[in-house]
Amino acid sequence: MNLNNYCTYGLCLGIALLAGCASQPGSTRTLTAFGDSDTRVILTNRVQPEWLRPSTNPFTLGPGDKLDLELIGETNSLTPTVVCPDGKIYFNVLDGADVWGLTLSQAKSLIEQKLAEQIRNGPKVSVSLRAAQSKRIWLLGRLQSPGVYPLNRPTTLLEAIAAAGGTTTFITQRDNASTTMSEELADLKHSFVVRRGTMLPVDFDRLINHGDLSQNIYLEPDDFIYLPPVVAPQVYVIGAVGQPRAVGFTEDLTLAGAIAGAYGTVEDAYVSHVAIVRGSFAQPEIAVVDFAKVRRGKAPDVKLQPGDIVHVPFSPYRYLTKYAETIMNTFAASVAINAGSRFFLEEGETGGVFIPVGSRISIQPPPPPPVGQP
């Protein structure tokens, strides 16, 4: 049975739960919420107006920021310094001034106060920012120059992508014989921004291909931007399965086959609320399937499509919109960790993967495959 028989999709995100009764061959499935009445939840999936305005929060110092300090009225006192990993700066006779989280004016006042404790008629100090390194954004995936970039001024998503050289195309990489055309193209329909652990509903296709500036949000420190490559067709299986992974797509791949490809469900999986996510991340379509009945042969299996995300939960979800957000955020966090890991390995870094502070992204090693499985 095709997924479209499980729910009717509108322009926005439609979510429905599978009915309790079994279908007869050729019949149409009735969609109900927990077996009670016909239900569809429509989410307004749009960019928030405040995301399109630059932040009014003043710049605050953090580890890595480079400063120029000078004692006013004293020649040859100009001293380049850096905010150390402990958040302190060391200047003149100071044994350390903790400026982490302070604005430049607040840092100036603190330094002058501490100097006054050490020097009679404490001098006045000039504090200027030479380079902002503590505020960073991730720009990974199919970009000309992916990497971690400083965020030292109000920056829009388009400006950040331009700073990374723009998206890659077949023409720009035509001399790279080791890379196929599909690997070079950015999959804009599945590109995303993660902010503090949440995927933002930005439509990269509308922004880049159609010039829709309503999607051109201002970025914030620790934002993670990822433009995945157009790869061989895959289905992603995450959640309460033996090994969350991408499963190669075939024309006859079904929900049961995809879950089996991820080594099946774990013992505590709640298989009555398995979700299938389909389509653009800006307007995803989500259906919730009673996989317990599929396994018992009391409901038809669901045929999958390339790019589908299958999520097996550990517990039932009472609120459908929350379920949708959980799935998308879990998927985005997984992709972010894998992309960040690959980037550091390719760059030869040995210090491990940097996970943005406040991103709520954590690394959990995948469980070993079941006994007897390779």
Image (tube, helix red, strand yellow):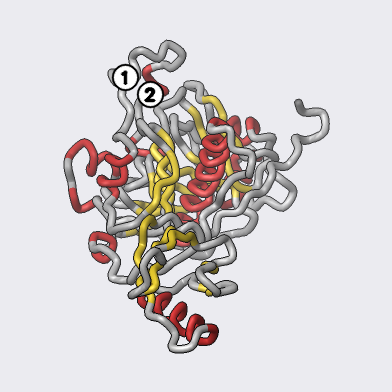
Category of crowding for the residue at label 2, using alpha-carbon neighbours closer than 10 angstroms: few (below 14), some (14–19), many (at least 20)? many
Against 22, residue 178 (above or below) is above
Q: Quadrant of the C terminus?
A: top right
Residue in the foreground of this view, choosing between 352 and 287: 352
Numbered-mark total: 2
Question: Disc 2 vs disc 1: Cβ atoms closer than 8 Å?
Answer: yes
Residue at image position (31%, 50%) is 202
Residue 246 sits in quarter: top right
Q: What residue did someone put label 1 on? A: 170
Amino acid type, label 1: Phe
Task: Classify mark 2: helix, strand or loop.
Answer: helix
Q: Is residue 374 left or right of residue 52?
A: right
* Residue 320 rendering spot, x and y as whole percentages: 46, 60
Whether residue 195 is visible here, answered yes or no, is no
- Residue 121 visible in rendering: yes
In the displayed orientation, state which residue is furthest to the front.
75
Left or right relative to 303: residue 265: right
Check disc 1: other Cα within 10 Å, few if <14, some if 14-19, many if 20+. Answer: some
What kind of residue is marked 2?
A: Glu
* Residue 62 tag number: none
Find numbered disc 1 in the image and state the secondary structure of the residue it sits on: loop
| First of labels 2, 1 by sequence position | 1
Alpha-carbon span between mark 2 and mark 1:
6 Å
At x 72%, y 52%, the residue is 268
- Residue 316, how many percent across, how many down? 59, 59
Indicate left or right for 125 with 209 as reference: right
Compared to residue 78, the image places residue 205 above or below, namely above
Residue 287 x %, y % = 45, 47
Q: Nearer the viewer, residue 231 or 9?
A: 231
Look at the picture and state if 218 lies above or below 366.
below
Compared to 22, does 154 lie above or below? Answer: below
Q: Which residue carries the number 2 mark?
A: 184
